[in-house]
Image (spheres, grey):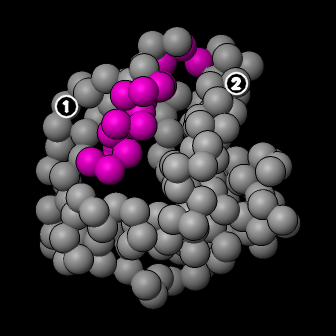
Amino acid sequence: MLIRAFRIGDEAHLHQVFLSAVHGIAIRDYTPEQVNAWAPQIVDPALWADRMRGIAPFVVEHEGKPIAYADIQPSGYIDHFFVSALFARQGVGSKLMQRVHDEATLNGILVLTSNVSLTAQPFFKRWGFSIVEERQPVVRGVVIPNALMKKEL
């Protein structure tokens, strides 16, 4: 398993990881309507590519194929953190979170924050994050509850 920097050309693979994570894992905590609003099967490839290039995530590869990704912004905000359903609960997320922490330390980031799904909250809590605020964001007309979580390093 390799963790590497994002490369141009990863975009479509990362969209598949995102879809797998939301439709295959988060479906346990959200309704089909919420999952479909959060992660529609069809998106504008150019908009998705711009988003991935903008957040410049770390990518976890297994046998040369992306299976997970996460980013950390200069502010300490983690915008995306997703593991393919096929690789859930196999330590991939922990390796990726360790990489995020290492990058934060390297760049002098003292606080990590993220808007975390109901599904991922237990994982983030195990990594020392705490809930700052429960939220009810509306995405494509559907409320998708999450929480702002924070960790001081």
* Residue type (three-letter) at the residue carrying disc 1: Glu
Q: Which residue is mark 1?
A: 133
Residue 102 circle label:
2
Give residue 56's position: percent from left, percent from top.
Answer: 67, 51
Secondary structure found at label 2: helix
Outermost residue toward the front in this view: 90
Residue under the point 48% across and 18% down = 111
Q: Compared to 113, does 81 lie above or below? A: below
Q: Quadrant of residue 84?
A: bottom right
Secondary structure found at label 1: strand
Q: Quadrant of residue 27?
A: bottom left
Q: Could you tell which of marks 1 and 2 lies nearer the N-terminus?
A: 2
Residue under the point 37% across and 28% down = 125
Give the camera-side residue of 103 and 121.
121
Few, some or many residues within 10 Å of mark 1 (<14, 14–19, 20+): few
Give residue 90's position: percent from left, percent from top.
Answer: 60, 49
Residue under the point 52% across and 49% down = 89
Q: Compared to 52, does 98 lie above or below? A: above
Which residues are the magenta region? 109-127
Few, some or many residues within 10 Å of mark 2 (<14, 14–19, 20+): few
